[in-house]
Image: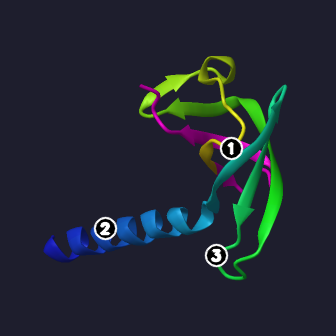
């Protein structure tokens, strides 16, 4: 009985680790260049090359917009030019659709 439970636990661990490897999320940190309708343009610096580039991210109905820890709509977030931002993208779903947008809390 003990061997069976050890085998089951091992299988669960392998399954969970395999699922986490399938999710290919990446977070881009930078400053806001512009916000137009449902698109935010961000100036990011590549960690490897240290080169600066501008990236466009699409804000969809599924995108979570957080200011501090507070969830809000894109309009209520009032994103400003040159504001620090972190955008998470799930590359398995889309290369440009943001899943999470994080902004600093406003006083």
Report if residue 92 is visible in the image.
no
Answer few, some or many: residues within 10 Å of disc 1's Cα (few below 14, many 20 plus, some between 14 and 19). few
The image quarter in which residue 70 lies: top left
- Tag 1's secondary structure? loop
Q: Which mark is residue 54?
A: none
Task: Say if 39 sits above or below 37 in the image.
Answer: below
Residue 52 lies in the magenta-colored region: no
The mark closer to the camera, 3 or 1, is 1
Magenta region includes residue 100: yes
Please name the colour scheme applied to the rendered image: rainbow
Q: Name the side, left or right, on which 43 lies relative to 27.
A: right
Q: Measure the alpha-carbon separation of dots 3 and 1.
A: 20 Å
**Are dots 3 and 1 in contact, CB under 8 Å?**
no
Residue 28 placement (x, y as % from top left): 65, 58
Residue at figure coordinates x 22%, y 68% from the top left: 5
- Determine which residue is flagged by label 1: 82
Image point 68% across, 18% down: which residue? Answer: 75
User: Residue at left 64%, top 48%?
Assistant: 87
Q: Residues within 10 Å of mark 3 (few under 14, many from 20)?
A: few
Q: Nearer the viewer, residue 12 or 82?
A: 82
State the image coordinates of residue 86 (x, y, percent, origin top left). 59, 49
Is there any visible trace of residue 105 in the rendered image?
yes
How far separated are the C-alphas under marks 2 and 3? 40 Å
What label does residue 47 carry, if any? Answer: 3
Residue 26 placed where, x, y %?
63, 60
Residue that label 2 marks: 8
Which span of residues is magenta-colored? 88-107
SS label for mark 3? loop
Mark 2 crowd level (few <14, some 14–19, many ≥20, 10 Å Cα): few
Q: Quadrant of the C terminus?
A: top left
Secondary element at tag 2: helix
Nearer the observer: mark 1 or 2; the answer is: 1
């Amino acid at each position: 009985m003990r061997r069976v439970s050890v085998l089951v636990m091992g299988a669960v661990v392998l399954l969970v680790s395999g699922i986490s490897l399938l999710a290919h999320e990446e977070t881009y940190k930078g400053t806001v260049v512009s916000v137009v309708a449902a698109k935010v343009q961000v100036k990011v610096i590549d960690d490897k090359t240290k080169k600066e580039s501008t990236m466009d991210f699409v804000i969809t109905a599924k995108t979570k917009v957080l200011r501090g820890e507070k969830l809000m709509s894109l309009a209520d977030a009032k994103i400003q030019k040159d504001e620090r931002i972190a955008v998470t993208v799930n590359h398995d779903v889309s290369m440009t659709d943001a899943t999470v947008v994080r902004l600093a809390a406003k006083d």
